[in-house]
Amino acid sequence: MQETLDSLWIALALGFIVASMILGVQFNSFVHPFTVLMAVPFGVTGALATLWFFGDRLNFMSMIGMVLLAGLVKKNSIILVDYTNQLRSEGKTRQHSLDAGDADHRALVLCAV
């Protein structure tokens, strides 16, 4: 059982490495993969806090759930970053009078809504 849990931690770490490489190619940036992967620790922290609150332990099933949660959080972050980049580029091309900071701010506000 301990060997299985150790291999799940390794799978989670390898997933982060592979995901950052794929996201770097997808976004053509070194910053956006870290932006996407920065949300994953918050999800894992929430899962661990929920386990603690309900008095459950970290076991095989909860580790599988954490791997799935990391994938869902990563997918949501990819969608938000891509949508924000899309709104940012549309704002810059549609209204040339806007400076870069104002277009970025509007893109983030629209993405949050």
Image (spheres, rainbow, N blue to C red):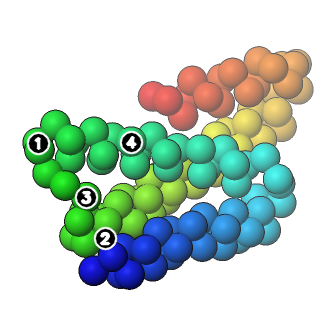
In the picture, residue 68 is in which quadrant?
A: bottom left
Spatial CA distance of label 4 from label 1 is: 14 Å
Please give the name of the residue rendered at 35% of the width and 60% of the height, measured from the top-left corner: 66
Type of residue at label 3?
Leu
Query: Label 4 is placed on what type of residue?
Result: Thr
Side of 35 where 6 appears, left or right: left
User: Disc 4 or 1, which lies upstream in sequence?
Assistant: 4
Q: Amino acid at mark 2?
A: Ile
Residue type at mark 1 is Phe
Residue 1 in percent (x, y) is at 27, 80
Q: Which one is in front, 67 or 27?
A: 67
Q: Secondary structure at mark 2?
A: helix
> Do the numbered discs 3 and 1 sit on residues whose CB atoms are within 8 Å?
no
Mark number displayed over residue 45: 4
Instruction: Answer few, some or many: residues within 10 Å of disc 3's Cα (few below 14, many 20 plus, some between 14 and 19).
Output: some
> Mark 1 or mark 2: which comes first in sequence?
1
Determine the residue positioned at 35% across, 81% down: 4
Q: Height in image: 66 above or below 31?
A: below
Determine the CA span between mark 3 and mark 4: 13 Å
Q: Nearer the viewer, mark 3 or mark 2?
A: 3
Q: Is residue 26 visible?
A: no
Q: Secondary structure at mark 3?
A: loop
In this figure, which residue is indicated by the disc labeled 1?
54
User: Could you say whether the residue bearing mark 4 is in a helix, strand or loop?
Assistant: helix
First of labels 3, 4 by sequence position: 4
- Mark closer to the observer (3, 4): 3
Question: Tag 2: Cα neighbours inside 10 Å, few (<14), some, or many (≥20)?
Answer: some
**Number of dots carrying numbers:** 4
Q: Which residue is mark 2?
A: 64
The percent position of residue 52, horizontal first and vertical second, equals 20, 41
Q: CA distance from mark 3 to mark 1?
A: 12 Å
* Label 1 packing within 10 angstroms: few (<14), some (14-19), many (20+): few
